[in-house]
Image (tube, rainbow, N blue to C red):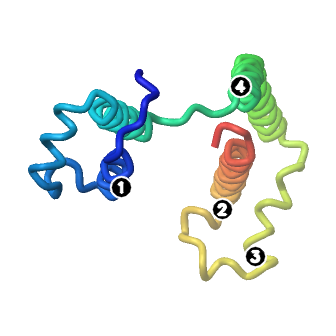
Amino acid sequence: MNFTTCNRDKEVAQALAAGYWPEACTQDLRAHVSACKACSQRVLLTQAFRRERASASVQPRLESPGVLWWRAQLRRRNAALERLGRPLLGAQIFAVAIALVAAAAFFVSQAKTGLGWFAWLADIPRALHFEALLPTGFQNASGAVLLAVLLLAVIAGLGGLAAFISSDKA
């Protein structure tokens, strides 16, 4: 680049700064720029810098390396916690299933032995006057046991649903 100045350098600089180059300039100024080496270099450099600025403004800005590192560490930690949580969730489901099977087996064994543990179940509808609400099939002792089993199944299902919703996966 030549550091010599031209007497029309200021006029070319104003035209470039205002955005008038080359459409709104006089034919005389265009002829001067094509003949003058300093003015043509100014126009060339200014247009090159404007193109680069426009292309750089379109490109996305990268975040700081510290933020990128922090996010990567957070992702790595969350992935490790998820890998650890999978076997724990399986163990919890297995434990709930075993507990439900054991409770069902206990209730069935107690119902078969007939020690009178379930005699109070037959009296619940009569004591609370639920006869009017219950169908006739549930008003005898076997219907009351079936009603209790259904109630326990609903409670267990709602408990499992509550455990699933409160877990981190939901």
Closer to the camera in the image, 39 or 57:
39
Indicate which disc, 2 or 3, sits on the residue closer to the N terminus.
3
Disc 4 from disc 2: Cα separation: 73 Å
Indicate which disc residue 65 carries. 4
Q: Residue at x 90, y 43 (%)?
A: 115
Disc 3 from disc 1: Cα separation: 101 Å
Callout 1 crowding tier (Cα within 10 Å): few <14, some 14–19, many ≥20: few
Callout 4 crowding tier (Cα within 10 Å): few <14, some 14–19, many ≥20: few
Residue where numbered disc 3 is placed: 126
Disc 3 from disc 4: Cα separation: 73 Å
Q: Amino acid at mark 1?
A: Gln
Disc 1 from disc 4: Cα separation: 41 Å
Closer to the camera in the image, 42 or 141:
42
Which secondary structure lies at badge 3? helix
Indicate which disc residue 140 carries. 2
Q: Are marks 1 and 4 in contact (CB under 8 Å)?
A: no
| Nearer to us: label 2 or label 1 | 1
Closer to the camera in the image, 79 or 148:
79
Residue where numbered disc 1 is placed: 14
Q: Amino acid at mark 2?
A: Asn
Q: Residue at x 25, y 32 (%)?
A: 36
Which secondary structure lies at badge 1? helix
Indicate which disc, 4 or 2, sits on the residue closer to the N terminus.
4
Which quarter of the rendered picture does the C terminus lie within? top right
Which secondary structure lies at badge 4? helix
The answer to whether residue 87 is visible is no
Q: Give the left or right position of residue 135, taking residue 105 as reference.
A: left
Residue 116: image location, x then y, percent: 89, 49
Disc 2 from disc 1: Cα separation: 103 Å
Q: Are marks 2 and 3 in contact (CB under 8 Å)?
A: no
